[in-house]
Image (tube, rainbow, N blue to C red):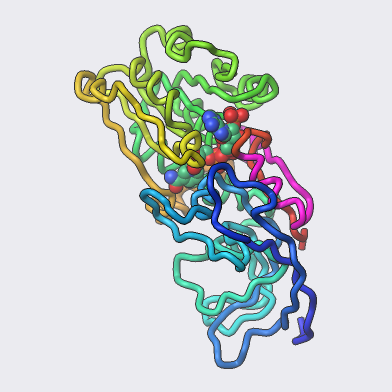
Amino acid sequence: MGSEEVSNKQVIFKDYVVGVPKESDMELITSKIILKVPEDSTGILLKNLYLSCDPYMSGRMRKNRGPTYVETFQPGSPITGFGVVKVVDSRHPNFKTGDLLWGMTGWEEYSLISSPSPDMFFKIEHTDVPLSYYTGILGMPGITAYGGFYELASPKKGDRVYVSAASGAVGQIVGQLAKLTGCYVVGSAGSKEKVDLLKSKFGFDEAFNYKEEEDLDAALKRYFPEGIDIYFENVGGKMLEAVLSNMRVKGRIAVCGMISQYNLEQPEGVHNLFHITTKRIRMEGFIAREYYHLYPKYLEMILPNIKEGKISYVEDVAEGLESAPSALIGLYSGRNVGKQLVVVARD
Ligand code: NAP
């Protein structure tokens, strides 16, 4: 590609958000970009292909945040997040034109990354699977599911496993890994369509719509009369409270996320934490990047399973950068069915 100036559509973060983010908190603009890395830089110029919508992103829109592990978005700058990209120019020794990568990029057609840090991008070596998978099952959510389940929850055959937000990017993978391990697996999700998917496509033993349950504690007792060994926590709040009452002695809770709390000004309380002591429960949080070193091992395991059809994967694909704000916001009302991503360009 030459050094011509081209137009660059961008999704700009307008200003800090209170409560649930809205589409109007983001704005599509068109600017210009020269498709060449400046001579005095060791940067890379990327063409963005697929962008990932992830629940943690609403936290980055808030000014007065609680505990966090990722920086706040800058008002007036493009949203940033995980994506699949193609290198169109490079002055960095580790990257060359034509490389396909996944990692942190901008919500725009082209991004100039002036000094890519070593852990910012993974090279995509396997292209006999859809490239979009690197926003999900072959990207950050995949390694999250793998690390959280195998490393942290210490599963063994016969364990009774419960997964919340089970049809989403992370949940659908966790449920299937648990089935591969020989566990009994139950998932919850927020619609009939998702519940059907859990049972018919992802092979969960049981699934229920938590929105239709008046008493979550009773619902869990129905599916786990002998209690839960492993809870893969994606939701938090009242769901966590109901789970704690139903955990078995020496149970494990892998705290991946708590989406029900992300957009509240005042987080909800959980009132029965003493179960952790009486049942000697191990409850531990984690962040995907702690398991990045396991990525090659994960790929070795997951790629054959995908190719042989032993692991299914469902994506919710939004077309075009203009659809990105709505796709992101949809996560917080459960509009997405499967991994939510946005196609900016297919090559
Ligand atoms: P996802 O499940 O694909 O999408 C989010 C889903 O959460 C929605 O579709 C919705 O499904 C559910 N949800 C939204 N608001 C809810 C509420 N108030 N109560 C209950 N459920 C609600 O998202 P994902 O990418 O797989 O992420 C799942 C969880 O993992 C999130 O908590 C996320 O922050 C966390 N995560 C953590 C890490 C890490 O490094 N620790 C990495 C990736 C993801 P329903 O229709 O089922 O309600």
Is residue 124 something that shows in the picture? no
**Number of residue marks:** 0
- Image point (53%, 84%), residue name: 42
- Image point (69%, 65%), residue name: 108
Name the image quarter holding residue 3.
Answer: bottom right
Name of the residue lying farthest toward the bottom: 40
Question: What is the x, y in percent for residue 190?
Answer: 61, 24
Is residue 245 found left or right of 309 in the rendered image? left
User: Where on the image, by quarter, is ligand 1?
Assistant: top right
Name the image quarter holding residue 118.
Answer: bottom left
Question: Depth check: 100 or 193 in front?
Answer: 193
Is residue 154 found left or right of 233 in the rendered image? left
Q: Is-magenta flag for residue 342?
A: no
- Image point (49%, 21%), residue name: 185
Assign the N terminus to one quadrant of the image.
bottom right
Is residue 251 something that shows in the picture? yes
Question: What is the x, y in percent for residue 41?
Answer: 55, 87
Question: Depth check: 332 or 25 in front?
Answer: 25
Residue stretch rendered in magenta on the structure:
305-331
- Image point (71%, 59%), residue name: 27
Q: Is residue 92 above or below residue 204?
A: below
Question: Depth check: 6 or 290 in front?
Answer: 6
Is residue 311 found left or right of 48 in the rendered image? left
Assign the C terminus to one quadrant of the image.
bottom right
Q: Is-magenta flag for residue 312?
A: yes
Question: What is the x, y in percent for residue 327?
Answer: 69, 45
Question: What is the x, y in percent for residue 323?
Answer: 75, 51
Q: Is residue 68 above or below residue 217?
A: below
Q: Is residue 21 above or below residue 124?
A: above
Q: Is residue 310 above or below residue 12?
A: above
